[in-house]
Amino acid sequence: MVLNGSQIIIECLLEQGVDTVFGYPGGAVLNIYDALYDYSDKITHILTSHEQGASHAADGYARTTGKTGVVIATSGPGATNLVTGIATAYMDSIPMVAITGNVGTSLLGLDSFQEVDITGITMPITKHNYIVKDVSKLADVIREAFFIANDGRKGPVLIDIPKDITGAKCEFERKKPQEHTYSVNSDEIEEAARLINEAERPFIYAGGGAVSSDSFDELAKFAELVDAPVSLTLMGQCAFDNTSPRYTGMLGMHGSMTSSLAASGCDLMIVVGARFSDRVTCSTDSFMKIMDGKKILHIEIDPAEINKNVTVTSKINADIKLALSKLMKKVNQKKNTEWMNQIAEWKKQYPLVQVSDNPDDVLPQYVLETLHELTNGQAIITTEVGQHQMWAAEYYDLETPRSFASSGGLGTMGYGLGAAIGSKMGNPDKTVINIAGDGGFYMNMNELTTLAKYNLPVIELVFNNTVLGMVRQWQKLFYNNKFSQTTLEKATDFELLGKALGVDAYTIRTKSDVRTVLEKAISANKPVLINCLIDKDINVLPMVPAGASIAEPILEIK
């Protein structure tokens, strides 16, 4: 059949199983939006307030569904507004396809109105990108983009399409999506199994790869088989049930003392889909001193990550799900009673606890633990970036797969509300809560209007301490209390703001307000903004200073 470029785009999206896209129209994508109108019964389009919000929505949709997120933007500033969202997805290996319009092919390179070289701009932050100058190649480019976004280590792909190509016509034939095939080296499996079978104090450290490979069941079974404690990176949150007695908390800069001691005390560290980032090792030299004499087994799909930051003993370079499935057939059932008893003792000795001299103070731990209780641990949690992000990872025990979306590698303030919109669209039956600080909230509060427009029952929970809390915490520790430009203290009336933007709004002022307000918000079945007032001197602990050893975290800040 003969279709124009815009119809081909939509047909290819349908081929790939896409039912939801996020975006913002403009002149260069008018043809695409005209086609979307005709396909509105098959593809839902969510109009955000800003293209960056749309890119984060596509990202959150991908993280919490396992599908590919799709975002559409026009040329020029529309395309450049996607850059932060694309970089966020790239750093965290999230499958996304960004479709941008551009000026007509005859106008390319002439500094035309709203023309930018978006493929050049995004080359370092995409797995691949394209500019399509021949409509006959458009369908195959889109198919290839979806395949690349999901193959191996996942990530974003951008397709830039000049306006005349979206209107040009050619023959189109539907095709089935190409399947992904993976293999594993049997010698690597044998060597890994030998190391595990010989180990007496194994320690599992899992990251985002365990989530993106959908290895939740495999990781849980593997931990039981190996009889090992499990620590997760920020990106690995929700890869393993946080309520399990095996779970020791995060590892690294804001990791638990138990995880640090487990890393120091193990004889085999089993790394599952993690990359030894600087937020985990803190200092590579000190980390390697801790690991001196210990063995490290790295299970990772991206060969470039193996031996990049930390030298390992052995590896399995393969898809995590496949690797764990094959490995479990070779590993003996282990019983490391003494080791697991030691882990349990450390957990009792070093609990994560926030305390205050005033019993009426609102502590983030109490808020998040109450939230966990009221949602039965079944909510999807998205976050902005800062102290609240760490508190969410520490105190809301994630129990279900794909229930956490947070910007890890890039650390993007303003990420969470867009991600919450995408998460809710992909999981309409789930309670979705964005945990924010007031700094991050001010970066994306315009997306509250998106919640109101579509009546999406998302809860925006803002820990409002009137400061940029994480930066202020560093200033307190390392810059002699010189709080340069970290005091916000804006005169915003959150309840009036919520009303103006079309959402319900409540304020938590004292501990006695917490349960009442959270219950109202959860039962409202509409978008809700919660202004949770907390003290500006509540810190994120433990904390390992940059360059220090994870074995020596700061446990108290006076």
Image: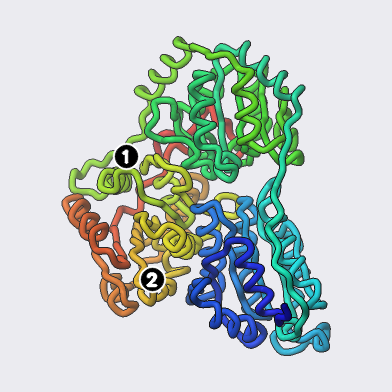
Q: Position of residue 378 (x, y in %)?
A: 35, 46
User: Residue beneath label 2, please?
Assistant: 451
Q: Residue at x 37, y 40 (%)?
A: 397
Q: Distance of mark 1 from mark 2, alpha carbons?
A: 32 Å
- Whether residue 381 sits left or right of residue 521 in the image: it is right
Q: Going from the N terminus, do you reach mark 1 or mark 2 first?
A: 1
Instruction: Look at the picture and state if 200 lies above or below 428.
Output: above
Regarding residue 261, the answer to whether it shows in the image is no
In the depicted view, which residue is nearer to us: 330 or 414? 330
Instruction: Look at the picture and state if 106 lies above or below 149.
Output: below
User: Residue beneath label 1, please?
Assistant: 354
User: Which amino acid type corresponds to the residue marked 1 in the rendered image?
Assistant: Gln
SS under mark 1: loop
SS under mark 2: helix
Which quadrant holds residue 77? bottom right
Q: Which of the image's four quarters has the N terminus?
A: bottom right
Protein image colouring: rainbow
Q: Residue at x 76, y 41 (%)?
A: 304
- Whether residue 296 sits left or right of residue 470 in the image: it is right
Q: Residue at x 54, y 69 (%)?
A: 21
- Whether residue 231 sits left or right of residue 327 in the image: it is left
User: Which amino acid type corresponds to the residue marked 2 in the rendered image?
Assistant: Leu
Mark 1 surroundings within 10 Å by alpha-carbon count, few (fewer than 14), some (14 through 19), many (20 or more): few
Instruction: Look at the picture and state if 314 lies above or below 124.
Output: above
Q: Which mark is residue 10?
A: none
In the depicted view, which residue is nearer to us: 36 or 367? 36
